Image (cartoon, rainbow, N blue to C red):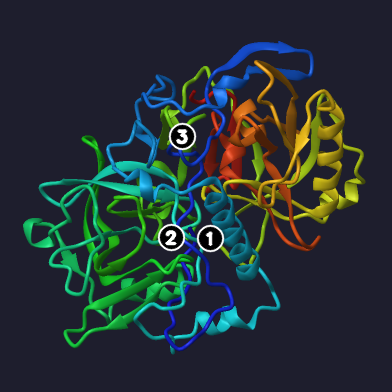
Amino acid sequence: MLATTIASSITISFLFCVSFFLLLCSSKNGYALGGGERKTMQGHFHTFQVNSLLPVSVCNPSIKGYGKKATLKVVHKHGPCSHLSLDEANAPNVTQILSEDQSRVNIIHFRLSSNSAQNNILNSSKATLPVNSGASIGTGNFIVTVGLGTPKKDLTLLFDTGSDLTWTQCQPCLVSCYRQQEPIFNPNESTTYKNISCNSAECTQLTSHAGGVIKRCSNSSTCIYGIGYVDQSYSIGFFSKDTLTLTPTDVLPNFRFGCGQSNRGLFGGAAGLLGLARNQLSVVSQTSSMYQKYFSYCLPSTSSSTGHLTFGKGGTSSALKLNFTPFSRNSKNPSFYFVHITGIKVGGRKLSIAKSVFKTTTSIIDSGTVITRLPPAIYSALRVAFRQKMTNYPMTKGLSMLDTCYDLSNNKTVLIPKIRFYFQGNVKVPIYPTGILFGHSVSQVCLAFAGNSNASDVGVFGNHQQKTLEVAYDVTGGKLGFGIGGCS
């Protein structure tokens, strides 16, 4: 969920639909892979039961990944482990999920295009409020609960590695607030709340560091922020400071955040957003003295299980081995986490692709994109290799950008080839079975990867492929770690 400048005077060619969701929320609207995979592995194949494709309505929390440091429970915002509610009639179907995912990827490519004059226009100080462009990256799938203010009020926030600014809705909602599950934060009830003045150095961080978030000054010289997203959701309000509580022992005074007075969007009942990108206003940077710009997470395998978000190195289990790949240097957008993919193995065999193809490929890891995107030549080789291993199962029509789909309705168990990614430094990352397939129903189950339109487009390692992995961001050390079995 990447912030972009809000400009009422600019019409953007990318106007897209509502927020997207990783896993499916109801049997009426479709299915994603469930957690019933058999642990037995036959050579270079995964074995799982087809009925594990069906959604589960009971929460099955993971017991892994909770250490001594600041650890927050991560759940899918519309799964049975979430306390947020969503009417079944408003739940997204699979077509919407994939359409909105493609919208996010389109805007990532747009933002990273060196030939995009629009980027400079969007970052211009001449941009004005209110929001009407909707020119950003949509809203996320996973939520955590933190405390804000003194005394603290618990707030459930979406978290995303592509956003810098943290914000929440605030009373008195001078213009409007969308419906959220918890009481809206009232700054008048916090003894540590402060507005940030317009002539302060902190106010200038909105434009110089916050990935396109713009600032304005009110008549009272209070710093005002504005941030918009791809579905035309937005938040506008006072740039402020208050105490952020992650755990009873992990408390950050004077945390800078957006106190939203005009908000619109489909945030699934969440109170706002927790930004985990690289820039100065993100939680990662603001807690650097406490956690040395180190955090990790594990995204649950299904919407009926739980994961975790942990700040600091001490939160990772000593039994969990992490292998690190260096972050790639890229000046096009300092908020992204760039990595370098060097190879892919399918069913025990490495794709026959020239090393030069991988060397010229730039990729980011993104907790907000669902389906991993690859350069056309690499995806084509992956697709061919996967299809060769799946000839025992009848193919069916494609699903949005997913073009390798199967009808598994006549099968109780299925064998699928294992897929392993290689990152710079010979870091091997096996993809969990639920990250290999994406299902509409048992009669339409698809390979959960897609190709970019152009070879020059940046690749994206999406959250569907990150499930159950411990993903550690050592920002100070300039490296990204992967561990197997961080959660279930």
| Residue at figure coordinates x 49%, y 23% from the top left | 488
- Which is more toward the observer, 7 or 321? 7
Amino acid type, label 2:
Asp
Residues at badges 1 and 3 in contact (C-beta under 8 Å)? no
| Residue at figure coordinates x 40%, y 19% from the top left | 63
| Vertical relation: 325 (above or below) 485 | below
| Residue at figure coordinates x 80%, y 30% from the top left | 346
Residues at badges 1 and 2 in contact (C-beta under 8 Å)? yes
Dot 1 lies on which element? loop
Q: Total of numbered circles in the picture? A: 3
Separation (CA) of disc 1 from disc 2: 7 Å
| Discs 1/3, front | 3
Separation (CA) of disc 1 from disc 3: 37 Å
| Discs 2/3, front | 3
Q: Earlier in the sequence, mark 2 or mark 3?
A: 3
Q: Is residue 473 left or right of residue 355?
A: left
Amino acid type, label 3:
Ser
Q: Earlier in the sequence, mark 1 or mark 2?
A: 2
- Residue 425 appears in the figure: no
Q: Position of residue 11 (x, y in %)?
A: 52, 84
Q: Is residue 313 left or right of residue 380?
A: left
- Residue 27 appears in the figure: yes
Amino acid type, label 1:
Ser
- Which is more toward the observer, 334 or 399? 399
Q: Position of residue 258 (x, y in %)?
A: 29, 64
Dot 3 lies on which element? loop
- The label shown at residue 335 is 1
Separation (CA) of disc 2 from disc 3: 35 Å
| Vertical relation: 172 (above or below) 321 | below
- The label shown at residue 164 is 2
Disc 3 designates what residue?
Answer: 27
| Residue at figure coordinates x 54%, y 28% from the top left | 468
